[in-house]
Amino acid sequence: MSQTAFTTTPLIGRNEELARLMGVLERARSGAAGAVLLAGDAGVGKTRLLDEVAGRAARAGTTVVTGHCVDLGDVGLPYLPFTEILGVLAADERFTAVLAAHPAVHRLLGSGPDPAGGPDGRLRLFEDVAGLLADLAAVAPLLLVLEDLHWADQSSRDLLRFLFSRGVLHRPGGGPDRRLAVLASYRADDLHRRHPLRPLLAELVRLPGVERLELRPLPDPEVARLVRALEDRPLPDAVVHGIVARAEGNAFYAQELFAAAEGGSPCTNGAGNGAVDADGVPSGLADLLLIRVEQLSETAQQVLRTAAVAGRRVEHALLREAAGLPEDTLEAALRAAVGHQLLLARDDGTYAFRHALTREAVYADLLPGERSRLHGAYARLLAARGRTPETAAERAHHSRESHDLPEALAACLEAADHARRLGAPAEELRHLEAALDLWASVPASDRPAGQELDRITLTLRASAAAAHAGEFHRAVSLTRAALAGVGQDADDELAARVRYTLAGNLLTVDSLAAAFRYSSEALAMIPAEPPSRTWVWAAATHASAARQVGEEATALRVGRQALRAAEQLGMTAARADLLVSLANAEGGGRRSREGQERLRQARDLARTAGNAPVELRALFSLAMGAFEAGDVPACLPVLTDGLDRARRAGLLSSAYPLEMRYLQLLALYTLGRWDECLRVAAEAAPALPAAGGAFATSPALYVALARGDESAADRARALLKGPFDWMGALVAGIVLTDDAARRGDVEEAVARMREAVTALGDGTARRPGVTVRLAALCLAAVADRAVESRRAGDAGGDPARWADTATELVELARATAGRDHEGRAQGPEGQAWLARAEAEWATVVAGPDPAAWEKAVAAFEHGDAYEQARCRLRRAWALLAVERRAEAAEQARRARETAAALGAAPLLERIDTLTRRSRLGAGADGGDAAPLTARERDVLRLLALGRSNRQIGEELFITGKTASVHVSNILAKLGAASRTEAVAVAHRRGLIAPQPAGPA
């Protein structure tokens, strides 16, 4: 029973806290009463967590009653939360007799004398409430939930002190156990220094049986999960990342920001009307934040407004000068702001807003003139301290907001230079774009002196910063803007530089034909003889572009010529870049011994030259070559080195480090290190660029799909939204094709495959290397459909049609695996997928072929444990068709070991289904089944009680999916085809004791 309406929204990111509270409940059900004081800022998720605990407790048979404290200002109602609790109990006929035994309690319900009628009457009331709760707990386990203790009246606080110190949490000598738990929440950020709850909390936490649990802000990945859970459809990464950054771990703020971003209704547990003010804070949320500000004196509010203009943090001395207040007045105002937990005092002599949204709300509440005046004051104060690089960004911001444009332009350029030295390309881009916006508004005479700057050069520099920051489409736009600004009389070298820069940026967004066109134009504008630095870099870009569009001869010719010129001119970085291109194009390519040696030489040259982007390109090609050669473990140390160097250079968001991250996760997936793959992906995701970076962690979708995550397909479709991304389209094509094939939807699988091949081929006749994998996945669905049709004797199944489809697909796989777009046969991975495609095709045209599946199993020995397990299952199926049962059982067993180790529940289920139907395991009453683990015995006990997977998970504190895996294991070990049969077999074998009969 509960007054709380338990929400159905999934609880996210609170597993540890939930486990701790459920542990208190479990101990209380055993007779060890306990209490938890749950602390946390407003909106952090206290109520949601308590709802979850209360819901689970109620489903387990615990009586749950909830009382709320309400903010009534100075006119508090005495005992309000306890009156609410008793009202709920009085309305339930089951407790009539218990309430009748405690007449003093009726005073709180208004049917007796004043509960505060003298000291003795107050003590009798307290003792009677304690007695009532003890009697209720003797009848059934009891959970008492008290919400918002920071608003509790004095009488309620006194009663709570009595209950904890002398009442319900302690058993008088020889008394019965107390099956009681109390969970009380309060807002930590509302407890100013003189708040009356503070001394009570300090007293309570020292009592035995009372503990404190602080609910901290959610980590960013969990906030992202929460935001995505608020909408059925996939959300753009930019929206999610923006909300996560501003919410700072507060669940309520995240929901309000989401509601405002979507333009929909705000969430039901908060105030707000969905409107957004000028600074992007939902108006309802801003009102809530400003309520606490308005409780301060006018002077303290003015100090907060002055601090808000400075930003999230401000130095004490700078704030004093900007506010223009005497020291004692300022300190009094700051003490009030800190006491109300609006500001935090730091050890370094600065003050910071407790939450960024509070600062935004205060700033948005400023009048325009007041805002401009304060920005001007900060700009002057910072300039007076000296024009240091460290303050350039602040000076630029304040100067611009106070409309001092010449000073803002100069400071923007200083800030950009400082960001570049620090290896912070995103910040460099922001400052350069601000400078470009200001450029036309500042007369030439007022622009910074002593710098050889023009708009074209500045734009090219901004495009480079955008590329390094992972803003690839922005880099293209900026370079196009530079090209548009190049006049007819422009210097040929500058015009060529703009064009080859544009070509390089176009390659990163997979606009290959356009890249080749611009690199051709750049090369034609500069004579090859005598060689020049501009021509060498133009040729290096053209060689890369030529390879991408299949112009291999051009790539080799231009690349070799440019390499000789680079050596002649002593251009070490260009030599390294050209060696990478030639290693990829010549001979056996990057996976050959010669290619790997040339790439190591390129890496060393780039490192000597101090050119990090070229070094990263060489490292990526080294790792990719090892992967393609089938030496998957060898690529991981190279990738670790590359990502470390990218981190130190501030280039983690640039093109090659993003591809390194993708390859790292793909290698971990392939090697079966799935938990590590998911962990690395989750850690990397928050730092990915909002536009164009999602593909870097997309191999985690392969794990999600293989483990039965129903959201995997939707998340894959999200990769197809926005500007075209080649790698995102590749992963989405694989996931969506495999998902359709597993569901047996042949038509959809083939359609998804064809869409992916067309998109990845860039509209040309070239087939991307992944085509062989996509064809094999489609063939699996075709083979299953063909076998079903044959088994059913379904004339309408049109066997010839399936044979034709299978032949078309296998020919596509053969052509792709035998000759990729560079004219070489694919490596071990491609050959393994071809072997699987051949085995599936043989199944369609002639029936399951054990020999073909033996080849497929052997082909995946290069390291893909999961795909090898899938092939083992198919081989077991083929062996059963020719009555080779012992071999089939061995293949099924080995496949099952891999699937269980990986947590691949859908594959595990298919293996167990084949095992049961074919009776490959022990007989129903056999004694040779593998013994059950302790956890499996726990699950079996709950199975016998008729629990669902979800209920098993809740009682054992594991997920429903984990419970499903345990159930599947039990069925396989007992040789049972159903849960009911498993329980019957377990009873016959004495694995579980019969349940005692209930009362007649």
Image (tube, rainbow, N blue to C red):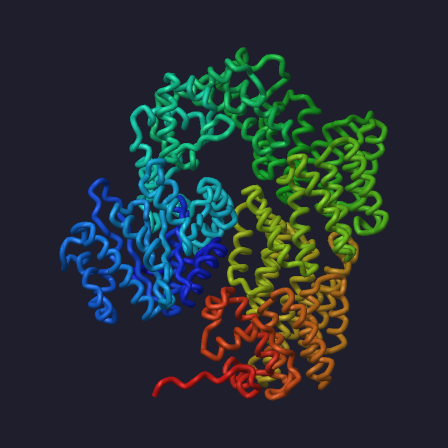
Asked whether residue 284 is in view, the answer is yes
Residue in the foreground of this view, choosing between 62 and 130: 130
Residue drawn at (51%, 63%) of the image: 710
Residue in the foreground of this view, choosing between 169 and 467: 169
Question: Is 304 above or below relative to 729?
Answer: above
Q: Is residue 187 left or right of residue 786?
A: left
Residue furthest to the front in view is: 173
Q: Quadrant of the N terminus?
A: bottom left
Residue in the foreground of this view, choosing between 881 and 92: 92
List x then y, in percent, for residue 99: 22, 66
Residue furthest to the top in view is: 445
List x then y, in percent, for residue 243: 45, 43
Asked whether residue 817 is in view, the answer is no
List x then y, in percent, for residue 79: 23, 52
Residue 506, by quadrant, is top right
Q: Is residue 446 left or right of residue 117?
A: right
Residue drawn at (30%, 62%) of the image: 133
Question: Is 914 above or below relative to 713?
Answer: below
Residue in the foreground of this view, choosing between 819 and 890: 890
Tally of marks: 0
Q: Quadrant of the C terminus?
A: bottom left
Residue drawn at (30%, 32%) of the image: 294
Q: Is residue 18 left or right of residue 931?
A: left
Question: Is 580 above or below relative to 405?
Answer: below
List x then y, in percent, for residue 483: 61, 29
Question: Is 337 above or below relative to 114?
Answer: above
